[in-house]
Image: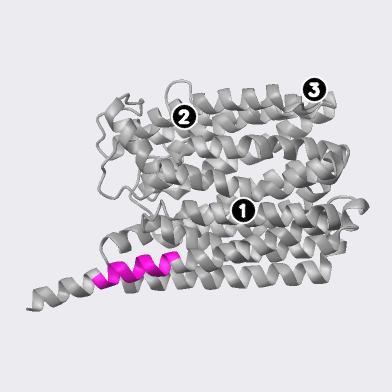
Amino acid sequence: MAAPLTGNAALPLERPAARLSLRANFAWTLSGNVVYAGCQWGMLVALAKLGTPEWVGQFALGLAVTAPVLLFANLQLRSVQATDVEDQYRFGHFLALRLLMLGLAVLCIAGVILISGFGRQAALVVAAVGLAKSFESISDVYYGLMQKHERMDRIAKSMMIKGPLSLAALAAGTYVTRSVAIGVAAMAVVWLGVLVLYDMRSGRMILKANGARVDGKPLWNGAVLRRLAWLALPLGVVMMLNSLNANIPRYAVEQRLGQWELGIFAALAYLQIAESTVINALGQSATPRLAAYFMQRQMPLFNLLNRRLLLMGIGMGAAGVAVALGCGHFILTLIYRPEYAEYSSVFVWLMAGAALSNVAGFIGYGLTAAKCFRVQMPLLIGESLVLTAACFLLVPVSGLMGAAIAYVIAKGCLIVFSALALRHAVKSVAGLTGAGEEASHA
């Protein structure tokens, strides 16, 4: 039974409990991600129904501009927390570093807005998205704490609260004011409320349940923060590159074709979210377990779990392409408007790219669990170069179709080289384990 809260809390929290099983964590993570991703997609649908593709394009531009900056600033501290099996850092260190980097990110986004030459409405939307994503970035630190202690149910409940409320706020604010910027600002208020009333309280409860001597305050130890930042820096670059690689086609479309076409492309591309939701749920739930297997050099178990994840990703990707081929035109007409359905062939290519992204994503989770942080930078830089070159060549000639094909080409290259990197990491540890066993027998 849920425990009543005292004070000014408005959102319920249950008493701390033991770590959940991998199956339970996956179920909770999938449920939370499905609700949240569905609501995020619902935002695009709402903007498409309430306005024009240009509205969708403004929102997509806000995400495309702010995401690389904020994801770099995040330094993927959530994954570093989740894989910190030996407790080398305390939660307060992660929180302090996140707040420090977030301040720099906000200044960077403000600078981009000032020098970008965006129109007034587009600039306001970018600023509002940056504000909302800043609150989400702080919540992410608390999610890392929950993930480390294998309490994905708490993350899921936060997302289930935040998703519907933010969708309602965005839709209502935009409908009443006919301004996407005000709708996004209303969404930011919801995200701040969930952060304060649920995420922060839940994080403090987990710390207390695990005997922590602090109540979740940032710890400003310069030497520790520098060491943590240096450790996480490769992952920050990786996340920035991941975001850039997702948005490079959008930049190319916006520059070459305009915000109307960007709205069409973003709406089609966002339908990949169904697959990425499951991929992220599986990957986030499995990362602590994979990290433990790798640290303990239990390579057969590490490889078995990796293979299962990859097979799931391949199966989901094939199903997505089949649905796009058979029902793409009908789905786009039903969900959006007839003008979106005219690009059903682009949708098929985007779903093919999503299938490849599934496989690349699971390989990336394996590399992160193995703490192969730095090798991911050249892999994603290579993907960025391939994607940029392909967009440069194909978008002017083939428009949205060219952007989708460029995405497929880049993901295929990433899979090949990421698989080689993970194979090398596994073989290295397997070789050390074998040598150790031989020495002990001798």
Q: Is any part of residue 298 visible from this angle?
A: no
Q: Which residue position holds label 2?
A: 101
Sooner in the amino-acid sequence: mark 1 or mark 2: 2
Q: Report x, y in % for residue 178.
A: 85, 27
Element carrying mark 2: helix
Residue at 30%, 26% (x, y): give it. 222
Sooner in the amino-acid sequence: mark 1 or mark 3: 3
**In this view of the protein, which residue sits in the foreground, 307 or 422?**
422
Residue at 76%, 69% (x, y): give it. 323
Asked if labels 2 and 1 touch by Cβ distance under 8 angstroms, the answer is: no
User: What amino acid is at disc 3?
Assistant: Arg
**In this view of the protein, which residue sits in the foreground, 274 or 438?**
438
Foreground label between 1 and 2:
1
Residue at 38%, 48% (x, y): give it. 82
Q: Which residue position holds label 3?
A: 120
Q: Is residue 92 above or below residue 248?
A: above
Sooner in the amino-acid sequence: mark 2 or mark 3: 2
Element carrying mark 1: helix
Foreground label between 1 and 3:
1
Q: Is residue 426 magenta?
A: yes
Residue at 49%, 54% (x, y): give it. 378
Q: Report x, y in % for residue 418.
A: 49, 63
Q: Report x, y in % for residue 429.
A: 29, 67
Q: Quadrant of residue 91?
A: top left
Q: Is residue 329 left or right of residue 185?
A: right
Q: Which residues are magenta?
A: 421-431
Q: Which residue position holds label 1?
A: 385
Q: Report x, y in % for residue 264.
A: 83, 48
Q: Is residue 217 above or below residue 377?
A: above
User: What amino acid is at disc 1?
Assistant: Leu
The colour scheme used here is one colour
